[in-house]
Image: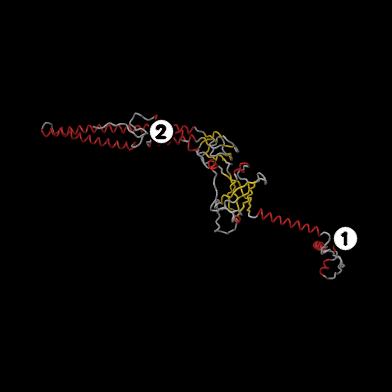
Amino acid sequence: MREEEREEWFSEPAGKEGNPVWDLLGEPPRARKPIRPRSRFRRLTARLWSRITRRFQGWPPERDERRPGRKRRRWILSSLVLLVFLFWFFFLRGWVVTNDAYVTGNVAPVKSQVAGTVVEVCVENTERVEKGQVLVRLDGLKSWVALQKAEADLAAAVRRVEGLFSQVARLRHRIAEEKAALGRYRYDLGLYRGGTASGVISEQQSIDAQWKVQESEQAIAALEAELRGNEALVQGTTVATNPMVREAAQRVRDAWLDWYRRRIPSPVSGYVARRTVQPGDQITPEKLLMSVVPLDYVWVVANFRERELGEMRPGQPVILKADMYGWGTRYHGVVEGLEPGSGSVFSLLPPDNATGNYVHIVERVPVRIRLDPEELARRPLVLGLTMVTRVHVAKRGNSIREPITRVPPKARAADYQSFLYLHELASIEGRIRRIIEQNSNRGGDAPSATGTRPQQGRAP
């Protein structure tokens, strides 16, 4: 910059005209010399002062022909403010909005009930499966061998119980035989005693007959004790209902379940997710193989701040928007209920505000929102999607202690019930009955299934 320009830039006008600052102050201007700053700070200060004084030139502004334009701008601004107020009054007032909302639903874990080696994986991720469809197969050789051994033990138990019934019958016959002999000995003893008194029979024969009576009585007592011991094992039962046979049959059922459950079915109908099992894996009942997600019944969990829950009640209408389908798609729902506590209460380490320094944190409470099934069928949602949720709290709803959470009957039958395991023993029961019948002596001494016993001979 040349010296003349610098003097003109940093100098102040000496006349009264053109100096608005002194005009406002009402003091006469004084002639000043050109400012010649010696430092950078003074140069910047002078430049700033010059710009400030220039803004006061022409103050106050003249009211010329620009006045109609300013009126138009004010009218437009006032109209905008009025429109914003009307929009808030009719559309935003009485609504609570949050974007901390997610789609959630049921996730059925698939685990094995027995340990074994995986020989086949039948499904893949994102594949649709039906309830009861086989997902994984395990090696069943070891369980089949165990089943054969259990069936052999059942046959042996049936034959052992048949032997107990036969032993009981044999003891009863032995007791009847001994009682018949005891009657004869007692009859002989009476004759011998009469003959001894008359001198026809010697006294020694009478004593021998008396000892035979006592021996027979003791033998009968021993047989009766043995009979009671054997009857304790079979009394009041048949071959099929005997405890030993039933225990062996239960081991057959256990071995059958181990063999039958080598096929792992799907507990519900849905879509496969997070498959981690591979052929050749050695799995245990605790290992998660995959998950099945039914998407026919999902809901939204919105986390509202505690200061927004004062007017929120079950039954209030909700409007939801999903980023998956854009802002033009809306879902309609209803508040089903509020969780009984905030998320921090159910965490692994819940807060203990009674110790240490306390910091106030605004908590969020999960709110369960039910979606319209027809809208959900037209535009399906997957778990984990974010939703923008608007709850109309101006509507009156139920008390927070009266939630309207209900599982639809169709979803309850499809996603909340699984009766696949109730019919696993249907085929083995007939097999157990055949084993018992094949190893039972139908013409023996054991009672039939109706509890009737064969006719026993009477002692004389």
Q: Residues within 10 Å of mark 1 (few under 14, many from 20)?
A: few
Residue 141, placed above or below residue 273:
above
Q: CA distance from mark 1 to mark 2?
A: 120 Å
Tell me where residue 126 sits by quadrant. Answer: top right
Tell me where residue 242 sits by quadrant. Answer: top left
* Mark 2, secondary structure of its residue: helix
Residue at the image point whose x is 11% and y is 34% from the top: 197
Residue 140 picture location, percent across and down: 50, 33
Tell me where residue 26 sits by quadrant. Answer: bottom right
Q: Residues within 10 Å of mark 2 (few under 14, many from 20)?
A: many
Residue 157 picture location, percent across and down: 38, 33
User: Which residue is disc 2 drawn over?
Assistant: 154
Q: Is residue 417 left or right of residue 22?
A: left
* Mark 1, secondary structure of its residue: helix
Residue 34 picture location, percent across and down: 86, 65
**Quadrant location of the N terminus?**
bottom right
Q: Is residue 190 visible?
A: yes
Q: Is residue 38 visible?
A: no
**Quadrant location of the C terminus?**
top left
Residue at the image point whose x is 55% and y is 49% from the top: 404
Q: Nearer the viewer, residue 162 or 100?
A: 100
**Amino acid at dot 2:** Leu
User: Most extreme residue toward the bottom, as rendered?
Assistant: 27
**Amino acid at dot 1:** Glu
Q: Nearer the viewer, residue 194 or 91?
A: 91
User: Which residue is disc 1 drawn over?
Assistant: 5
Q: Nearer the viewer, residue 324 or 343?
A: 324
